[in-house]
Amino acid sequence: MRRINAVLSGLGNIGSRFVGVLDRKRDVLQQKYGVDVRLVAAADVSGGAINPDGLDLAQIASLKGQGIAGIGQAGLGILEILQSVNADIFFEATPVNLQTGEPGLSAIRAALKRGMHVVTPNKGPLALAYGELRALARENGVQLRHSGAVFGGLPTVNIGQRDLAGSTILKIEAQANLANSYILWNMGKGMAYKDAVRAAQEQGCCAPDETLDVEGWDAIIKLVILANSVLEIDARIDDVKREGITHLTPEAVAAVKAEGKVLKYVASAVRRDDGSYELSVGPRALEPNHLLVPLGELQMGVAYTSDLYGIIMATIREEEPTPSASSLMRDMLSIYAP
């Protein structure tokens, strides 16, 4: 039995569910994979808690929204925790910040420098500083895993890195954003743009501030992470051609349908003759036989085209955050029980 000392930052939808998954799967982790995961420290915006023998997972999972300071220390920050505890792996699950990547970026840097593996679904630090973080991981002999940062529970990164090994990826096309997919689906039924946005918010796939979705930023972030991790190019947000959906009308969507095509919001990376990639996100009128067309309004999916394996496609319907939260366990097992 291998003991793994873990630290977690962030106890929102993803972090608290992840702790619940660890608690529920404790016997499976021990009996099938031979790992005993101890959460020796955890932090959220209220403070932090430390127990070298392991915090009570069920108790931590139940704290969502209440603040961990109630069982720990108010104001105890994650950077202080990372410098004071002996841990093997750091799970970073704080909210996405596209301006600075904080607080996740500084915490990930600190953990890597201390020789901890890092697992994160946090898109902000990866989109802003992927190359730096990858280099830090290599310098310190640890791994940086982030399969949950691209399409939640769908193993998009894993497929590109592992299952297409040895091939040249010619094209990546993805239905990458649930909110835009749901909005376009409703507009295809004649709903006005503003009403379609409201419907997506009521359904739960669109944030109260829809800007990141409808202007394309969420899809860009995911595409940049894919380009860095799978295509191994130094892609940045500014390298992606962006088109949102705020200008679309039901009439424009109907016109695409009248041509026998289907309007989808697509993130794509297309290999040029010189080996570079053209990166773009935006609404695309797809032919009926395109692989993304059958995807439902609440599905995400990716299609890889490579020189050796042809076209491989994977999809997911993720109606609540458990698959995304479980990706942290998947990434941990890829490190300790490959």
Image (tube, grey):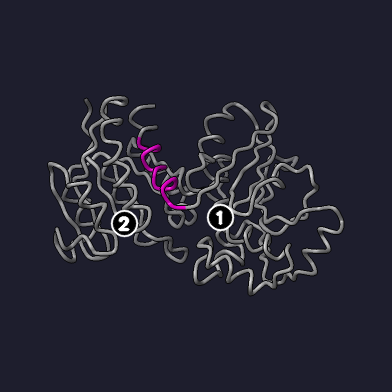
Left or right for 239, reference 334:
right
Span of residues in magenta: 320-332
Image location of residue 135, percent across then percent down? 42, 43
Task: Identify the residue position indicated by label 1 in the image.
Answer: 236
Image location of residue 36, percent across then percent down? 23, 33
| Quarter of the figure with residue 116 | top left
Of circles 2 and 1, the one toward us is: 2
Left or right for 7, reference 271:
left
The mark found on residue 10 in the picture is: 2
Image location of residue 253, percent across then percent down? 77, 64
Q: Count residues near mark 2 (Cα–Cα under 10 Å), then give few for <14, some for 14-19, many for 20+.
A: many
Counting residues from the N terminus, which is met first, the one under dot 2 or under dot 1?
A: 2
Left or right for 143, reference 193:
left
Cα gap from disc 2 to disc 1, whole angstroms: 26 Å
Mark 1: which amino acid? Arg
Q: Main secondary structure of the magenta part?
A: helix
Q: Quadrant of the C terminus?
A: top left
Image location of residue 198, percent across then percent down? 58, 71
Q: Count residues near mark 1 (Cα–Cα under 10 Å), then give few for <14, some for 14-19, many for 20+.
A: some
